[in-house]
Structures are given as C-alpha cells and as structure tokens.
Amino acid sequence: MSTTTIRLEDDMKARVSEAAARAGKTSHAFIRDAIAESVEQAEFDAEMDRICEERWAEFLKTGEAIPFDEVKTYLDAKVAGKPAVRPKPRKILE
C-alpha cells in the first residue's frame, strides 16, 4: 500500500474531522472512503457515457427508437402488475 499526502486548508481539515466524528470514523477512514466513492462515481459515469455513445451510434445507424410515451405506458403497466406488450422500435429518422 502506498502513501499519498494531501494538503487541506485548516477549515477543511476541521470540517473533515467533524464529519468523520459524526460518521463514527477516523479522519483517515473518512477521506479514504470519500476518495473511493468519488472514484467509483467517476468510473460509473464513464461507463454510462460509453453506453450512451454506443446506443447513440446505433440509433444514428438504424434510425430506430421507441417513443417515450410508449415506453412510459409499458413501464407503468409493468410496475402496476398489469399485462403489457413490449413496444417495438420503429424508424423515426429518415
């Protein structure tokens, strides 16, 4: 395990100490957890961006999509436990 040094303004260090105490953690654990959460969020965001770009490219290639109102109707029925026919994509770009 490697060591990294960070410099914090005095007021930020005090805020971290207080937040860590409220969370029942040491300042070190609080900072480590905050960094881990930030990295996980950045990785999640990057994956979502990749998926969106992939789907956008597919849409531009095929011109097919499912209109929002049809998706909403389908999902509302599924959540309510009602039978629902899954909507099919159709050409919306020419």
Image: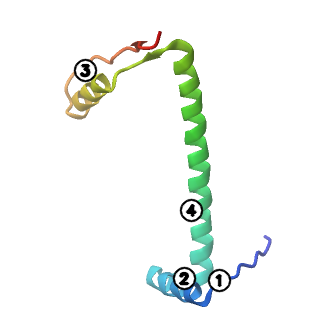
- Rendered-image quadrant of the N terminus: bottom right
Q: Residue at x 54, y 26 (%)?
A: 56
Say whether disc 1 or disc 2 marks the residue closer to the N-terminus: 1
Answer with the quarter of the image where residue 37 lies. bottom right
Whether label 1 touches label 2, CB < 8 Å: yes
Q: Residue at x 56, y 47 (%)?
A: 45
Q: State the residue lying farthest toward the front.
A: 94
**Mark number for residue 16?**
2
**Mark number for residue 84?**
3
Q: Secondary structure at mark 3?
A: loop
Whether label 2 touches label 3, CB < 8 Å: no
Say whether disc 1 or disc 3 marks the residue closer to the N-terminus: 1
Say whether disc 3 or disc 4 marks the residue closer to the N-terminus: 4
Q: Nearer the viewer, mark 2 or mark 4?
A: 2
- Within 10 angstroms of label 1, few (less than 14), some, or many (20 or more) residues? few
- Within 10 angstroms of label 3, few (less than 14), some, or many (20 or more) residues? few
What is the number of callouts on the image? 4
Q: Secondary structure at mark 1?
A: loop
Disc 2 residue type? Answer: Val
Disc 1 residue type? Answer: Leu
Disc 4 residue type? Answer: Glu
Q: Secondary structure at mark 4?
A: helix
When the figure is inspected, residue 27 is found, relative to residue 93, above or below; the finding is below
Disc 2 from disc 3: Cα separation: 50 Å
Q: Secondary structure at mark 2?
A: helix
Whether label 4 touches label 1, CB < 8 Å: no
Disc 1 from disc 2: Cα separation: 10 Å
Question: Which residue matches tag 1?
Answer: 8
